[in-house]
Amino acid sequence: MDRDAARGPRGGTLVLLAAALVAVLAVAYGIWRQRAAEPAPAAQATASAGTLSIDALEAKVQADPQNGTAWGSLGLAYFSQGRFADSVRAYERATALAPGKAILWAALGEAHVMASERDPMPAAAVAAFEKALALNAGDERSRYFLAVKRDLAGDHAGAIGDWLALLEDSPADAPWRSDLVRTIEQVGKINGIDVAARIAAASARSPAAAAPLATRAIPGPDAQDLRAASAIPPSRQRDMAEGMVARLEARLEQQPGNVEGWIMLIRSRMTLGEEEKAKAALGAAVAANPARAAELREQAALLGVR
């Protein structure tokens, strides 16, 4: 296969067909969306909500134009609907309001790539990815796309080296791994670069799979905590636990975009045997974070909440 045969309908090379394979959503605990060619969890959530979800987000930023989180959510919603130019504008506003968040710069860079009609790697995208890496040297999405840039510039060996380094840093259960490996294999084949042994070596050095947040172990109490707890009557222990959960719930009312906090609340309610309250917490979390509804439901399902 020559490089012309590898070109896609948008004028990009083979690697650009995989340009969104390792794009990351703003998930602090490491949930990633699947490749652009398949319906991603967040995209499914946005699509299921239809334009109402976008309308609600647009209304939110109009009511609170200084809300960087809302602008970021709107950028994601636009992106999931294929409205890439609109996504660029939303992410530009988000990065202006929250310039220290690498994830927003990486998302802006990807939106620029997808919005470009002719240039497969526009300068604005490169600048956004470089900004993201300046803030977070490990940002996977930016590392991936800047390797794409090297491949487009003719440095195929350098691009493969960068992708192999990303593969080595990727957890064993990362959903983008198989697509990343396929990209390395294809670019290697097109350019006559043997990559099989290097892929195997990088995979062998990859970190182990990470447990989902919902099932991740909670740090245990130390000896002093155990002694203090043993002195509290069982009824008081329950009251103490409920008080802690109530405080978490109150905090989420002030910070409804804290997805990790919502998952903690759902898990806490299930630990207390309050399944209906756990379901109510899931409903509130989805209502507050429609673009991440699928993520929330997936984590809640691990806890038995549906």
Image (cartoon, rainbow, N blue to C red):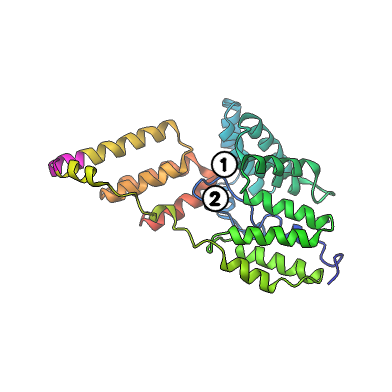
Work out whether residue 117 or residue 197 is closer to the camera in this orientation and state it.
Answer: 197
Name the side, left or right, on which 148 lies relative to 247: right
Q: Are marks 1 and 2 in contact (CB under 8 Å)?
A: yes
Q: Residue at 25% of width from left, 39% of height from top?
A: 242
Look at mark 2 in the image and give the residue it sits on: 45
Q: Dominant secondary structure of the magenta stretch?
A: helix
Q: Name the disc covering residue 53, or none.
A: 1
- The magenta stretch is 231-239
- Queried whether the magenta region covers residue 288, the answer comes back as no
Where residue 201 sits: x, y (%)? Answer: 62, 69
Element type at mark 2:
helix
- Queried whether the magenta region covers residue 234, the answer comes back as yes
Q: Name the disc covering residue 160, or none.
A: none
- In the rendered image, the quadrant that contains the N terminus is bottom right
Q: Amino acid at mark 2?
A: Ala
| Distance from the alpha carbon under mark 1 to that under mark 2 | 9 Å
